[in-house]
Amino acid sequence: MSRTKGAGRLAGVLALPLLLLPVPAFADEHRTAAPDGAEVYFITPQDGDTVSSPVTVRFGLKGMGVAPAGVEKENTGHHHLLIDQKLEDYDSAIPSDETHRHFGGGQTETSLELAPGEHTLQLILADQNHVPHDPPVESRVITVTVE
């Protein structure tokens, strides 16, 4: 038997126990747990406010701490701001684009350029990998009018 064939068999035998490991049945088993009572909310603006652009948005958080993206620390996360958007998939990383803003540096406020008119805003706290916690730590959706 050649050395290569023997190594291949050995690798197969060593890999077999890995196949027997349990596989999670649900995607949310990969989500980071949030403590009871954790809340994220808007300090400013408030629901129904009429504002001018740029809009200063300040994030509030109770029952958890803020940690930058990539840092795994229990009971922490970082903010994501949804603009005129609803999150559809809580089991995957939140997309990053103009309507899904990431604050992975641990920021707790931002300045937004918004077009005149009505806009909805929602905050969602996510773990080190941008995945919402379980249960989700999300604000209620607020509506602001930009003049």
Image (tube, helix red, strand yellow):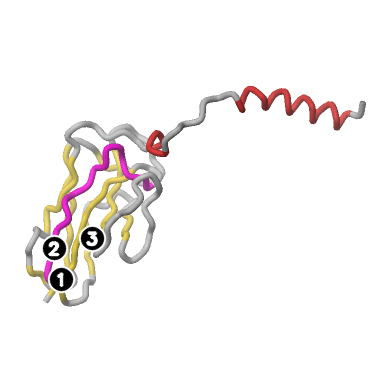
Amino acid on which disc 2 is placed: Thr
Residue under the point 12% across and 66% down? 144
Q: Earlier in the sequence, mark 1 or mark 2?
A: 1
Does 38 appear above or below 146? above
- Expressed as whole percent of the image width and height from the top left, the position of residue 107 reads 27, 52
Specify the label residue 118 is tagged with.
Answer: 1
Q: Circle 3 — which element?
A: strand
Q: Circle 1 — which element?
A: strand
**Alpha carbons under labels 1 and 3: distance apart:** 19 Å
- The residue that mark 3 highlights is 110
Does 98 appear above or below 65? below
Q: Nearer the viewer, residue 113 or 95?
A: 95
* Residues at marks 1 and 3 touching, judged by CB atoms closer than 8 Å: no
**Residue furthest right in the image:** 1
The answer to whether residue 143 is magenta is yes
Specify the label residue 143 is tagged with.
Answer: 2
